[in-house]
Image (tube, helix red, strand yellow):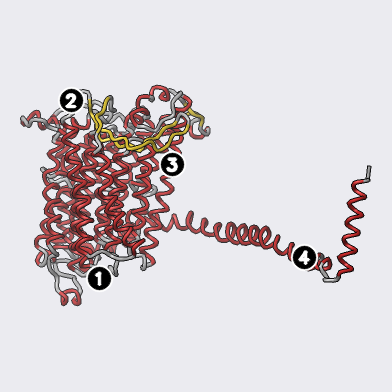
Amino acid sequence: MVETAATSELLRCIVLLPLIGAVVHGVMLGLVRRELPRGLVIAISCLAPALAFLVTLVAFFQLRDLPAGQTALVDGVYTWIGAGRLVAEMSFLFDPLSAVMCLIVTGVGTLIHVYSIGYMDDDHRDDGGFQRFFCYLNLFLAAMLLLVLGDNLLVMFLGWEGVGLCSYLLIGFWFGDRWNAYCGMKAFVVNRIGDFGFLIGIFLILWALADAGGATLDFREIQAAMPAIVERTVAVPTWLGGEWRLTTLIGLCLFVGAVGKSAQIPLYVWLPDAMAGPTPVSALIHAATMVTAGIYMVCRMSFLYAEAPGASAVIAWTGAITALFAATMAIAQTDIKKVLAYSTVSQLGYMFLAAGCGAYSAAIFHVGTHAFFKALLFLGSGAVILALHHEQDTDKMGGLRRHLPWTHKLFAIGVLAIIGFPGLSGFFSKDEVLLAAYTAHVPGHQALWAIGVLTAGITAFYMCRLHFRTFFGESRVPQDIVHHGIHEPANTVLVPLAVLAFFSIFAGLAGFPDPYGEQLGVPESNSLAHFLEPVLAQPPHHVELATELGLAALATTMAALGAGLAWFLYVSRPELPARFRARLSALHRLVENKYYVDELYDALIVRPLVGISDRVLFRGIDAGLIDGVVINGSARTVRGLASGVLKYAHGGLAQGYLVTMVVGTLAVLAWLLRG
């Protein structure tokens, strides 16, 4: 991964700046118990990520200008853990992979902070929580930066848990509403399931390397020690094959953590409910922070997955199935944010599809383009929600392009980018993902490619459906909302949308494919892949230009069919969807209710666990055995002994005490003289 590295103390500043912002807010709210003036809150909160972005840019140029043989910057802050042969440093690594991730997190994060000024100012539910919101937002950014800059698995895991905590705080930000509090708790609990697998993977790495003579959690040292564990095997149950390669088991355990954080089947259920939080939170979680953590971890450990083809195949198939499954669920949703939430789950599936096929640079490429157009879409939906006074149901929208012309145009750019319109960012990144599946050495890779193409068509359909139902056709907006007025939001909302729209159009040029570049004479084509080459394990694949153009044309045609069908149903013949729903009512209810997966989990897992916890653990063991027998029982025994027996020894009569002393003295003498 990295042979030699230069030292730079700038890296700690990238994490510390948003962390300092969060600490200032936390001290004022938690210790001083006074809110800062709103202008000062805004200045601290937005300046922290903006400065972190500038420091990241400086570090990026330092990285680019390193002499030959040096491909990373490191910042060793202090020794965190020193236990025998195990040493874990609080240190940061800035190589091409973490550089790309830091630019995304700080850049998009800064725009979301600026957008939040207008959004939270307009939100009348914010009863004194303005500073608390920005405190959580700064802390979220600091935790994600800690995750992507960590030089070892322990620092990564600290950031990993940090973003989990912040998601709980922000999803349940309006905790006075029981539903919001439930959604925050659901996200927290589901992610703990994934984190358990992640921890097992870390422990397996420690065990394997300790047996090999050097326990370590440092990424570069783990990669150097890989030959010592590649050939090792572990025993598994017979029905699983009896014996697995250790790298496969480690890869699968780590991937369980990624499944939780990046919302893949079967742990995706928390992400749609994350919409309970304010819209800027949805944008931050879905575009720049938490959900990309799993992808980043898999790519960071690409040297391990390159030696674990079985685990890689599981990742590819999980990603493909999740992409298709989530896309079908988005078709029947009417909540504008829920559609985008299932879209995120589906797009994350694309990223895992690429990573499982060994195309790690394609996965990171799609992480980057997705960050821009998904942030644009979420923040655009927030602009619509603000204009309609917090109405999110698209059944109560329609015709809004007349009232919100700028929001409509910017939102349309996001839609075109995500469906892969030729020339926009999503076209290039999705093309790379599908090409990776087509050329992969993964069992059933052609089926994976077919699923990806089909998902592209469904994505175009439901995203265009969302756009048309929101901005086209006759207005279905309730009259009380119309009476209060529908207008464009403030510039603090629109300016970040415009910046994100710019990158949604042009960010794809960073990954302009080599075959296109060679044919068209574009210098430094696919510069992102070349930039990431020193870090990511990249399997070679060579495709003829005609083949790649044909595959791209097929995917584009599929997307065009999906978009055309949405236009026909929701603009040209808007009466048809109601007829189809009536004729296919059972299927529509199934998809609208997300295949009843949440209800199934509730019946098979949640209720039985709650029942066991209540009747067995609480009433039987805690209240019955521990409280009733051990604690209260011992108290009743002592009380009974004292009141029933010992009370006669304390009657208050001097002659009684004298007799007791004489009897006791005689008993002691008899015991001493017994021999």
Report the residue marked by disc 4: 642
Counting from the top left corner in percent of width and height, residue 144 is at: 30, 46
Residue at image point 38% right, 25% down: 226
Assign the N terminus to one quadrant of the image: top left
Q: Nearer the viewer, mark 4 or mark 3?
A: 4
Tag 1 or tag 4, which sits nearer the N-term?
A: 1
**Mark 2 to mark 3 CA distance (whole Å):** 39 Å
Instruction: Farthest residue to the left: give it.
Output: 521
**Mark 2 to mark 4 CA distance (whole Å):** 84 Å
Counting from the top left corner in percent of width and height, residue 312 is at: 35, 34
Query: Which of the two residues, 261 or 585, is positioned nearer the viewer here?
Result: 261
Query: Which of the two residues, 484 or 551, is positioned nearer the viewer here?
Result: 484
Counting from the top left corner in percent of width and height, residue 552 is at: 16, 38
What residue type is disc 4 on?
Ala
Report the residue marked by disc 1: 124
Tag 4 or tag 2, which sits nearer the N-term?
A: 2
Report the residue marked by disc 2: 67
